[in-house]
Amino acid sequence: MRTLFRLSLAIIACLAFAPALYAAGDTPTIPTRPADPDYENGKKAVDTGNWKVALEHFDRAASRDPNSADIQNYLGYAWRKSGNLERAFKHYEAALRLDPRHKGAHEYIGEAYLMTNNLQKAEEHLARLDKLCFFSCGEYRDLKKAIEDYKRAKK
């Protein structure tokens, strides 16, 4: 009983003094990993459309962090943009295995399915994004527009 009383007092004291700590500017920080230079340089290469360089950087980043859904998604994107859909699908699928809720991977694999004339699979990923995005998100809007454009072009 005495232990429970002491624990309760400790919790109350923490709660009472927490606002004062935050007001003084001593906000807690969450330690982050340093940015991977290959990942960052790969993103820069994507921004300039240099797919070969992007692939080189993302391959090196993936060798150090094979469980990164973001890296796998970028590899899929760079392979798709460079014209190799088979390799793109492999990396998008890896990204979605690692993180089934990865919005970017759902958008991009949906766009890749449109390139292979597989509207049904693209719409499956749009439906998944609809569930992931409580209020419409950019990935949902982009894939929806791509599907609408695809349907218009097929008429």
Image (spheres, helix red, strand yellow):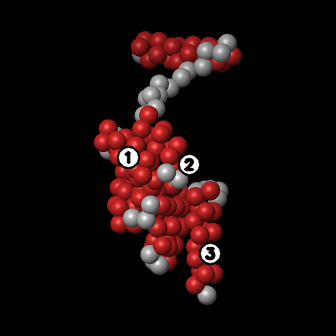
Q: Quadrant of the C terminus?
A: bottom right
Q: Can you tell which quarter of the image residue 64 is in?
A: top left
- Look at mark 3 in the image and give the residue it sits on: 149
* Vertical comparison of 149 with 62: above or below: below
Q: Which residue is drawn at 61% across and 15% down?
A: 26
Amino acid tagged 2: Asp
Tell me whether circle 2 and circle 3 mark residues in contact (CB < 8 Å).
no
* Vertical comparison of 144 with 22: above or below: below
- Kindly tell me whether residue 99 is visible in this rendering: no
Q: In this view, does 129 lie to the left or right of 24?
A: left
- Look at mark 1 in the image and give the residue it sits on: 56
Q: Earlier in the sequence, mark 2 or mark 3?
A: 2
Amino acid tagged 3: Asp
Q: Residue at x 56, y 16 (%)?
A: 14
Considering the numbered disc 2 on the image, is that residue within a helix, a strand or a loop? helix
Considering the numbered disc 3 on the image, is that residue within a helix, a strand or a loop? helix
- Look at mark 2 in the image and give the residue it sits on: 47
